Amino acid sequence: MQSHNGSLVLKVVLLLPMLRWCLWIYVPLHFVLVVLPVLKEYSFEYVRQETGIDDIPDVKNDFAFMLHMIDQYDPLYSKRFAVFLSEVSENKLKQLNLNHEWTAEKLRQRLKVNTSNRLELQLFMLSGLPDTIFEVTELQSLKLEIINNVTIPASITQLEDLQELSLYQCSLKIHTATSFLKENLKVLRVKFDDNRELPHWLYGLRSLEELHLIGSFSHETSRNIILESLRELKSLKTLALKSNFTKIPQSIVDVSSHLQRLHMHNDGTKLVMLNNLKKMVNLVQLELVHCDLERIPHAVFSLANLQDLDLKENNLKSIEEILSFQHLRKLTCLKLWHNAITYIPEHIKKLGSLERLYFSHNKIEVLPSHLFLCNKLRYLDLSNNDIRFIPPEIGVLQSLQYFSVTCNKIENLPDELFFCKN
C-alpha cells in the first residue's frame, strides 16, 4: 500500500509542473500529501444533474486528483472535461455549438415568403437541427436539405403556425411530434434517392392536403407497394409525383374521390395504361409532363370537371383528338407546349371556353384563322415555331391580354392586331 501511494505521489509530483503551466497556480506539496489518500474518487453527480447527461462516469486516482485541481481553478473546466467523458458528449457538444451558431434572431433573418405565401426557413447541409428553431414561433414552412439524423422533438408544438415541411434528402424521425404533425401539417415535400428513404409516418398525416414526392422507384413492385397507404390521406387534394412510373399506381386511384390536382413528371419514362384516369372525376388540374405520350390520352376526355390540362414535353405530333375536348365545358387552360405538333386542326374552334392556350416550342408553320374563333382567349403563346404569317382574324380576340410569337419567321404584323385593345 505504501509503495502504491509512493508511486502515486511521484506521478502527481511529476504532473504538477504541467498543472502549474496549464492552470497558472502553485500547489504546496504538503497539500498533495494530505489530499491524495483521501481523494479516492471524484464524482460528477452535480454535472449530470445540470447537463442532463446521465452517462458521465466518476473517475479515480491520478485523474481524479487532476480534475479536482482543475475544479478548484475553474469549475467550468471540470464540467467540460466531464461532458467530454460522456459517450453522448459529441452529439451534445455539436448541438450546443449548433444552437450557439444559429440563434433565433439569426434564423429570423433568413425567413422568406415562399410561393405558397408562407413564411419559410430553409436550412442546408447543417450537422443537425438547431433547437432555437422552435423559438421562431411565426414560422409557417420549414425546408431542410441534406441534413441527416434529424429528430423532431415535442417542442415543435411551439410552432403553432407550421403547416408546410420540405425534406430534401434528409432522414427525419418525429417520435413525440407525431400527433402535432398529424393535426397541423398541410403540405409535405420529400425528395429521395431511394424509395426506402420515404418516411412511413407520412401515411398517417390525416390533415395533409398536398403531397409532393421526388425520386426514382427502383422496381415496379415497390412502386405500387410504397404508395399503397395513400388511401388513408383523407384530406389529400394535390398529389405531385416526379418519378419514373410506367403506369398510374392503384393507390392514386384509391384517393381519386377527393383528389383535385394530379401532377406526374415522368422524366421521359413512357407512361402507359392511363384508363385509371377516368375514375378521377373530381380532377380540376392534370399534368402529364415528359411521359413520352404520342397521342392525347382518351381517358382525359372523361374528366368533366377538368379546368387545366398540361401535356408538356411529350412526343405529340398530331392532336386530331382535340375535338373531344369540346365535352369538357370547364376547360379554360390547355398546354400543348414543347412537343412536335406540326399543325393546329380545325376542331380547335370548338373549344369556346379556352382562355389560355400554350403552343410554344412546336413545329407549327401555318396559323389557321379558325383558331381565332376561340374568342375568350386571354393568353396565347405561339413562340418558338415556324410561323410566317398572322391572319387578320386575330383582331376578333377582344379579350386578348398576352400574345407571343417570338422566335418564328414572321416579317409583318397585321393592322388588325391593334384592334386587341387589352
Image (spheres, rainbow, N blue to C red):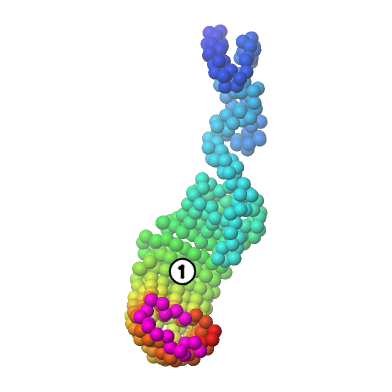
Magenta segment includes 409: yes
**Residue at point 44% right, 84% down?**
301
The residue nearer to you, when weighing 405 against 336, is 405
Residue pointed to by mark 1: 251
Residue 216 lies in magenta, yes or no?
no
The residue positioned 62% from the left and 57% from the top of the image is 139
Q: Quadrant of residue 241?
A: bottom left
> Which amino acid, by three-letter code, is at mark 1?
Ser
In this view, the residue in front, 217 or 307, is 307
Is residue 192 visible in the rendered image? The answer is yes
Q: Secondary structure at mark 1?
A: helix
Label 1: how many Cα within 10 Å (few below 14, some 14–19, many 20+)? some
Q: How many marks?
A: 1
Specify whether residue 305 is in view. no
Residue at point 38% right, 76% down?
Answer: 407
Q: Is residue 130 left or right of residue 276?
A: right
Decide if residue 75 is on the left or right side of residue 257.
Answer: right
Q: Is residue 107 above or below residue 409?
A: above
Give the residues in magenta: 403-419
Q: Position of residue 3 (x, y in %)?
A: 53, 8
- Residue 38 on image: x %, y %: 64, 15
**Where is residue 79 shown, x and y percent of the image?**
61, 30
Residue at image point 48% right, 72% down:
262
Q: Quadrant of the C terminus?
A: bottom right
Asked where in the image residue 294 lies, by quadrant, the reply is: bottom left
Which quarter of the image is occupied by the N terminus? Answer: top right
Whether residue 41 is situated above or below residue 178 in the rendered picture: above
x, y percent for residue 334: 46, 80
Q: Does residue 125 sit above or below 308 in this rendering?
A: above
